[in-house]
Amino acid sequence: MKLLSKTVTGLEEILAKEIEDLGGQNIQILKRAVSFEGDLKTLYRTNLELRTSIRVLKPIYSFQARDENEFYRKIKELDWSQYMSNKDTLAVDATTFGEYFTHSKYISLKAKDAIVDQFRDNTGRRPNVNVVSPTLRISIHIQIDEVIVSLDSSGDPLFKRGYRVERMGAPMNEVLAAGMILLTGWDKKSDFMDGMCGSGTLPIEAGLIARNMPSQWNRTSFGFQTWKDFDNDLWQEVRAEAKAKIVPFEYKISGHDRDFKAVSVARVNIMKAELDDTIDVKRTTFEKLEATSEKGIMILNPPYNERLAIKNINELYKMMGDQFKQQFKGWEVWVISSNMEALKHIGLRPSKKIHLMNGPLNCKYVKFEMYDGTRRKVFKEKIEES
């Protein structure tokens, strides 16, 4: 079957690699999405294991339309009894781009009307709408006059992992957090640290990656489980195979935050994720933070002065840079921020810059290599070794 996985800007290539590793074929990278092909097992595996996917869609129908009547008629022409009965419930989500259809909510309403009218005409009974937990969630994408209708196999978006019991202000999306970790190329053979961990999203995603635990291990339901062709035996096989691949982790994953409540919230979420034996969280001010080993990876999501306001933002970033230089020699440090001026005050030249979106915010994700010694000396040693 043809499938489509949605993601956030900047993570498309990472998602494509994940899909390839899970058996997807004919992979094509798109804007904020990756299309691929696979069987029913691939559909189940991608929902359970993908870390950088927001949802997995199954396209079932495409057509052209330029007005609401044509759209309604063509939606009604599809035999919806293949996918649901009049006793089931449905929800329709739509996105529109172009001059012919400009209101996505109206399109959702027209599609819903066409589907329930078909059941009323054929059976005398209309299925009900349930926007929270429908039997069938339908996704409609319109680009100018090209309409693609898909079934949403995920149900709730896949960034809802099921481990976030509590949250702090401006929490990071789990898909973005996982993508940031994968972008570092972390080989899981060194320590991982988040020095401003908030509710613990980055350490938890690092723990899931380090232990090879499926991203949705704590999730209880998916959209495909209410489909007519749901194969529970195959689903249990997919879960059993994923469970058999979970491994221990020999190094340290730690989270630190100066806020007592953040540390408490992070600990609750870590326990829910079944990673309390893998991740250690402590209350620590960043000024007192020290490396846990000779080398490792640190990722920081500091305040940007946008969603979380902070006084003297430039001084904070300067202090961060000083701490990197003094306490984290031999480490790779990655920082995400939408505050380009504050990033300059870190006072270090990044070796890599990646454009990412954190919600609506345009961000730079930058890498600092904290050499143990001068950069020139390190390069000289590498040349001599080669």
Image: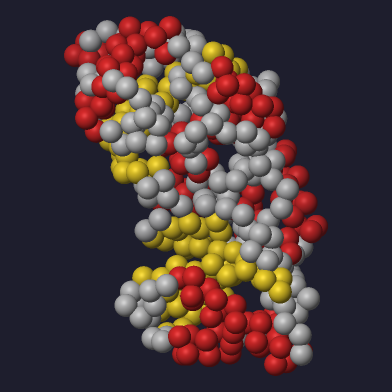
Describe the colour scheme in one phrase: secondary structure
Whether residue 208 is situated above or below residue 106 in the rendered picture: above
> Dividing the image into 4 quarters, which one contains the N terminus?
bottom right
At a point 38% along the width and 17% down the height, the residue shown is 331
- Res 370 → quadrant: top left
What residue lies at 48% left-to-right and 57% top-to-bottom? Answer: 6
Judge left or right: residue 308 versus residue 94.
left
How many numbered marks appear?
Answer: 0
The residue sitting at 75% across, 80% down in the picture is: 86
Residue furthest out toward the bottom: 121
Quadrant assignment, res 379 = top left
| Residue, far right | 233
Q: Nearer the viewer, residue 127 or 349?
A: 127
**Residue 351 picture location, percent across and down:** 26, 28
Position of residue 314 measured from the top left corner of the image (x, y, whole percent):
26, 22
Residue 239 placed where, x, y %?
Answer: 73, 47
Q: Is residue 77 above or below residue 302?
A: below
Front residue (pair 89, 4)? 89
Closer to the camera in the image, 4 or 374: 4
In the rendered view, does 320 fall on the left or right side of 383?
Answer: right
Q: Nearer the viewer, residue 51 or 338?
A: 338
Quadrant placement of the C terminus = top left
Up the image or down, 255 lies above or below 230; here it is above
> In the image, residue 136 lies at what x, y percent?
67, 68
Q: Residue at x 78, y 51 (%)?
A: 236
